[in-house]
Image: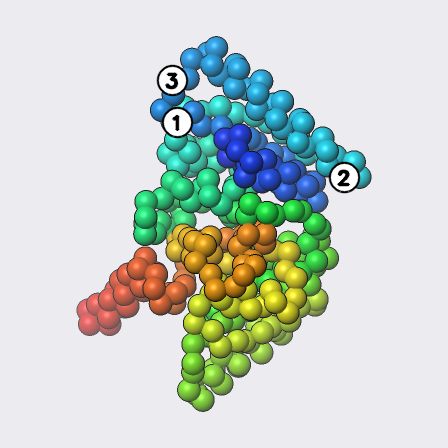
């Protein structure tokens, strides 16, 4: 079985250093290796320039990773790669070229490549799980994982991936279903789906919480006030909720987006991830129209 590989975009900022420190320790627990990717943007990549950048990238990685190597057991191998052009246009090719299993990135660096209010389908950005690291994140072995989901719209592959991650760290898994105000019948349907999901999942160290809350980020912040999540997990088909989480528009004084990493897994949703997500709503509308046409024909 091949060693899992993590891709970490790196542009020498403090946010990237924070992400490197987190990724190095995270990778050690997954027995994974790391590929650091630096994109030169509009600068011309000559052989001399590339050689200097590689030396600098290796120096950065060794200096900041070595501080966390004690007690890790098998240390992750770090490979360094330089590419011309901008990050967004290089991601898909780099993922395939280096056989990447997961992308770990500073939130601001990855999302900065998106235009204002632009929502992108995840496969068009990068067809791998995306772990975004906030500016104040510090790695600790995961003890509490919160997976926010729609209990009426789940994907077995996503559920298995979340359970596998929980097993790796022996973490408690909280499945959080947020919903708007529901009538009695709709609420009973949600409760029934939650009960079925509880029995379906093999991982035993878990709990399911159904909570009335229209706003995902407010719901996560509210939950973070009663427990200490080490990781939030989403399963979406586009970048809308990632952008919502890291937008900075919060009512709380100590919002979780500043310190709690967010793992986004891809799931083709039957329901919109959010009422305000244009991409999801359009996808759902197209699916409904296809079904109606199939019935008519």
With 113 as the anchor, is 21 left or right in this view?
Answer: right
Eye-nearest disc, 2 or 1: 1
Neighbourhood count class around disc 1 (C-alpha, 10 Å): few under 14, some 14–19, many 20 upward: few
Q: CA distance from mark 3 to mark 1?
A: 8 Å
- For the point 42% across and 87% down, the residue is 183
Q: CA distance from mark 2 to mark 1?
A: 35 Å
Determine which residue is flagged by label 1.
41
Determine which residue is flagged by label 3.
44
Per the image, label 3 sits on a secondary structure element best described as loop
Q: CA distance from mark 3 to mark 2?
A: 39 Å
- One can see residue 252 in this view: yes
Number of marks in the rendered image: 3
Q: Which is nearer the N-term, disc 2 or disc 1?
A: 1
Determine which residue is flagged by label 2.
72
Neighbourhood count class around disc 2 (C-alpha, 10 Å): few under 14, some 14–19, many 20 upward: few
User: Residue 40: x percent and y percent?
Assistant: 43, 25
The label on residue 62 is none
Q: Residue 91 appears in which quarter of the rendering?
A: top left
Neighbourhood count class around disc 3 (C-alpha, 10 Å): few under 14, some 14–19, many 20 upward: few
- For the point 54% across and 39% down, the residue is 15
Pick the front one: 285 or 256: 256
């Amino acid at each position: 079985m091949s060693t899992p590989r993590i891709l970490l975009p790196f542009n020498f900022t403090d946010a990237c250093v924070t992400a490197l420190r987190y990724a190095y320790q995270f990778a050690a627990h997954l027995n994974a290796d790391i590929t650091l990717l630096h994109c030169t943007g509009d600068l011309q990549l000559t052989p001399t320039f590339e050689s200097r950048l590689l030396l600098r990238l290796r120096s950065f990685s060794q200096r900041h990773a070595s501080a966390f190597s004690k007690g890790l057991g098998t240390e992750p191998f770090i490979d360094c790669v330089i590419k011309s052009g901008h990050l967004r246009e290089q991601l898909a090719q780099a993922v395939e070229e280096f056989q990447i299993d997961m992308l770990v990135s500073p939130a601001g660096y990855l999302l900065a490549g998106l235009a204002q209010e632009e929502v992108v389908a995840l496969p068009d950005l990068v067809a791998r799980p995306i772990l975004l690291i906030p500016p104040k994140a510090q790695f600790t072995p995961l003890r509490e994982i919160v997976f926010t989901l729609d209990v009426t719209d789940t994907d077995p592959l996503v559920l298995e991936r979340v359970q596998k991650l929980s097993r790796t760290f022996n973490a408690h898994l909280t499945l959080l279903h947020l919903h708007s105000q529901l009538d009695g019948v709709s609420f009973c349907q949600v409760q029934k789906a939650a009960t079925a999901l509880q029995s379906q999942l093999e991982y035993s160290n878990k709990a399911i919480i159904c909570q009335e809350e229209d706003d995902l980020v407010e719901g996560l912040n509210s939950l973070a006030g009663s427990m200490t999540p080490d990781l939030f997990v989403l399963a979406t088909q586009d970048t809308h909720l990632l952008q919502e989480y890291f937008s900075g528009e919060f009512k709380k004084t100590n919002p979780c987006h500043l310190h709690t990493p967010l793992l986004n897994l891809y799931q083709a949703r039957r329901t919109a991830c959010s009422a305000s997500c244009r991409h999801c709503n359009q996808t759902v509308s197209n699916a409904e129209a296809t079904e109606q046409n199939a019935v008519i024909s």
